Structure formats: C-alpha cells, structure tokens
Image (spheres, grey):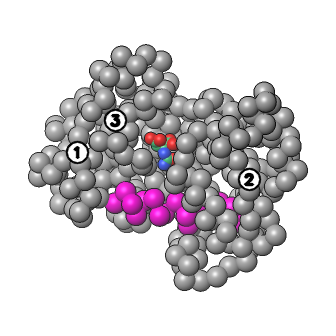
Amino acid sequence: MKFKGKDIISMRDFSKKEIEHILAIAKKMEPIARGKKKSQLLAGQILANLFFEPSTRTRLSFATAMRRLGGGVIDLSEPEMSSIVKGESLTDTIRAVQAYADIIVLRHPREGSARLAAEIADIPVINAGDGAGHHPTQTLLDLYTIDREKGKIKGLTVALLGDLKYGRTVHSLAYALSLFGANMIFVSPENLQMPTDVVVDLKERGVVVAQTSNIEEVIPKIDVLYVTRIQRERFPDPEEYESVKGAYRIDLELLKKAKKDFVIMHPLPRVDEITPEVDQTSHAIYFKQAFYGVPVRMALLALVLGGIK
Ligand code: NCD
C-alpha cells in the first residue's frame, strides 16, 4: 500500500483493503485525538486549509488533526479577504500555496476542482468537498463511526435520507458502503433522488438498492439512518427548494417504530431534519461522529505525509 504523497480526491482512489488500513490507524490515533497522548509525528510540516465554501467540522477537524500530530496549519477560510477577489484563478492560488505548505486541503463549489488542483500541485491535495461531487474524508469518518459504534459494516441495512441529489457525502458513502457489503435504502423526495449514474454503477456491481420517499415504511428495518440536509445553496431554482424544504423530520414519534439498537448519523450541519429531543436518545451518534473526524483525518495525514506506513 502506498499512501505517501497520494492525492485523496474520491473514494474510488482506495481499495477496500486500503480503507480498512486507514480505519485501523485511526483507531490507534484516538488517544492522541482526545489529547491523552502527545505526538510530534508531523512536526515541521504545514497543512494549508483552502475553503471556498462554508465549513465548521471539516476545516477545524483537519486543523486539530494536524496540530495534534505536531504540525502547523495555514488557513484561507475567507476567500473574500484573499486575492480571489482581485480575480485570481484557482490554478494560480494553488500554484502559490503549494510553496507555503506540505499538503493542501481544498473545499470548492465546483465539481472536479479538487482533481484539477491535484493535477497542478506538486504536493498532495485532499478533497474536502467539491460541489455536489465527492467528500471522501467524510465517508472515511462515516465508515469509522459505523464500525466503531455497530462493530461491523457488512450485512447492516443503512438508509440514506434527504437530499441524495445534491448531497456529496451520500455520493461518496453509497459507493463505500457497497464495498463493505452493507444493504442500502435511498429515501428522498422524488426530485432529490440519488443520481442515476450512482444507482446504475451500484447495480452493475451487483448491489441491491431500494428507493422510496417514505421513511415511516423503512424505519423498522434499518440499523443505521444517515440523515442529510437539503442542500439549499445548490438549487438552481429557489422555488424548487421551497417545495422540498422540511420534507423530513426525525422525531421521537418516528423512533418508536425503530429497532432498539439502531443509530442515527448526520454529517452536520443540521437544519430541521432532526428535532433536538432526539439528541438525548441513545440512537443519536452524530456528535460522536463529528469527533471521529479527528482520528480519521490524523490517520490520513500520517499516512500521506509519510510519518507512518
Ligand atoms: C457536509 C458537506 O459539506 O458536504 N458537511 C460536512 O462536511 N460535515 C454536509 C452538508 O453541508 O450538508
């Protein structure tokens, strides 16, 4: 397995074996991620966080991951304060930033932007979300969360709920879950269904997927419910957004029908898809999930920047 210097653009860049390796390293990183053990593994190395779209968890957990391993972080989180406003292209920004850092973490509204940046940069690029495209590090932490909280992935029934059309996390996750032998049910309003190319690819690889718009119907059958936000910023037509906003609400009433040990995940931010009362139940694991982003990103940084194999 060769991770050193690798770009991380899509889940397809990894084999199942490689994913398992990353998750195993993440497990070892947990005490450092919690601040209970110290590490200087990446001392002297610098990560550049380039975020051209809002972010809380992804940006901050990458920064924490790098710092917990002794590395430094530079940040472009307010593009309106950078030379982008003077008309600088993404290409030129990447060319310049690569001279200041050892690794670039990029979030950008355009699909394909991370792949483009990786082609330009001589240093590794990690895709932290490219429009409605991919979000591979979110998927790695989602897999880690399922494995950690349920003890396995294979054979579980996972429902992906919400905006499956524009949500990049579910595009990456559906592919990865198929590698691990989970059963999937896609639950969305009709106009926000999983893109056809994703569904066709899964079917061609022999994965059985069910699609519905009715969450009540599926809730008793599932082990994991992965809720997503309706991605308002990606709707070309605000009226279309108005017609689907608030389409789903996970509340205590709905949970009465669920299996006792079923878990609810969400990449966050949440808007109104999950009522706050649900947070107090044993099913809600989305804030733990947000923490797991730290050890998982530590594992990736350690592997890519060459500290460990
Ligand atoms: C997600 C994203 O940016 O795609 N957030 C995240 O990284 N945790 C989900 C979202 O914005 O809805």
Q: Mark 2: few, some, or many residues within 10 Å (few <14, many ≥20)?
A: many
Q: Mark 3: few, some, or many residues within 10 Å (few <14, many ≥20)?
A: many
What residue would you read off at disc 3? 162
What residue would you read off at disc 1? 250
The three-letter amino acid code for the residue at tag 2 is Ala
Mark 1–mark 3 Cα distance, whole angstroms, equals 11 Å
Q: Residue at x 75, y 40 (%)?
A: 82
Q: Which residues are magenta?
A: 285-302
The three-letter amino acid code for the residue at tag 3 is Gly
Mark 2 vs mark 1: which is more N-terminal? Answer: 2
Compare residues 85 and 99 and report the one nearer the observer: 85
The image shows residue 162 at horizontal and vertical percentages of: 34, 35
Position of residue 39 in the picture relative to residue 252 (left or right) = right
Compare residues 100 and 208 and report the one nearer the observer: 100
Mark 2–mark 3 Cα distance, whole angstroms, equals 32 Å
Position of residue 116 in the picture relative to residue 60 (left or right) = right
Mark 1 vs mark 3: which is more N-terminal? Answer: 3
Query: Which corner quadrant of the image does residue 10 belong to?
Result: top right
Q: CB of residue at label 1: within 8 Å of ligand 1?
A: no
Q: Secondary structure at mark 1?
A: loop
Q: Which mark is residue 48?
A: 2
Q: Main secondary structure of the magenta part?
A: helix
Say above or below: 254 vs 67. above
